[in-house]
Image (spheres, rainbow, N blue to C red):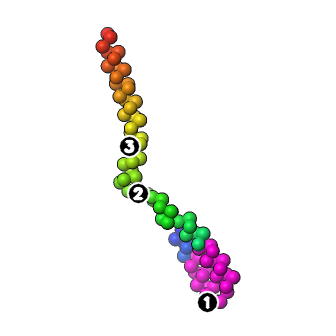
Amino acid sequence: MFECRRSALEERIRNALYHDDPGQLQEARDALDRIQEQDPDKMGYTRWPFDQRVFITFLISQIAPLVGLLTAIFNLVVMFGKYK
């Protein structure tokens, strides 16, 4: 998506340089700057497939509460099993 837009703007810049049109050149350059600011690679966002570190961090954050819940349920089952 960003590559397609970037390529189109680079083509507009080349055309503006070829036709010596400073207004179009400035407009295309500003648009290219805005596109580059929004690029996920530049922002540091991770794209799919995620790297292993991000995936493990996500899994741990989801599994930790589940382990706590299962431990509490297991303790209740053991506690009520002693009173029978």
The residue sitting at 67% across, 86% down in the picture is 21
Q: Give the spatial CA distance, label 2 vs label 1.
A: 41 Å
What kind of element bears circle 2?
A: loop
Kindly give the residue lying farthest to the left in the view shown: 82
Instruction: Please identify, in this view, whether the residue under mark 3 or under mark 1 is nearer the observer.
Output: 3
Upstream in sequence: badge 3 or badge 1: 1
Q: Who is closer to the viewer here, 9 or 83?
A: 83
Q: Which of the 4 image quarters holds residue 27? A: bottom right
Q: Which of the 4 image quarters holds residue 67? A: top left
Find disc 2 in the rendering and name its residue.
Answer: 49
In the rendered image, residue 46 lying in the magenta stretch gets the answer no
Could you tell me the amino acid type at mark 1? Tyr
The residue sitting at 38% across, 56% down in the picture is 51
User: Percent x, y for residue 74?
Assistant: 34, 24
Question: Residue 60 — which label?
Answer: 3
Q: Give the spatial CA distance, label 3 vs label 2.
A: 18 Å
Find disc 1 in the rendering and name its residue.
Answer: 18
Q: Give the spatial CA distance, label 3 vs label 1.
A: 56 Å
- Span shown in magenta: 8-32
- For mark 3, does the 10 Å Cα neighbourhood hold few (<14), some (14 to 19), or many (20 or more) residues? few
Residue 56 in view (yes/no): yes
Residue 1 in view (yes/no): no
The residue sitting at 56% across, 79% down in the picture is 10
What kind of element bears circle 1?
A: helix
Kindly give the residue lying farthest to the right in the view shown: 23
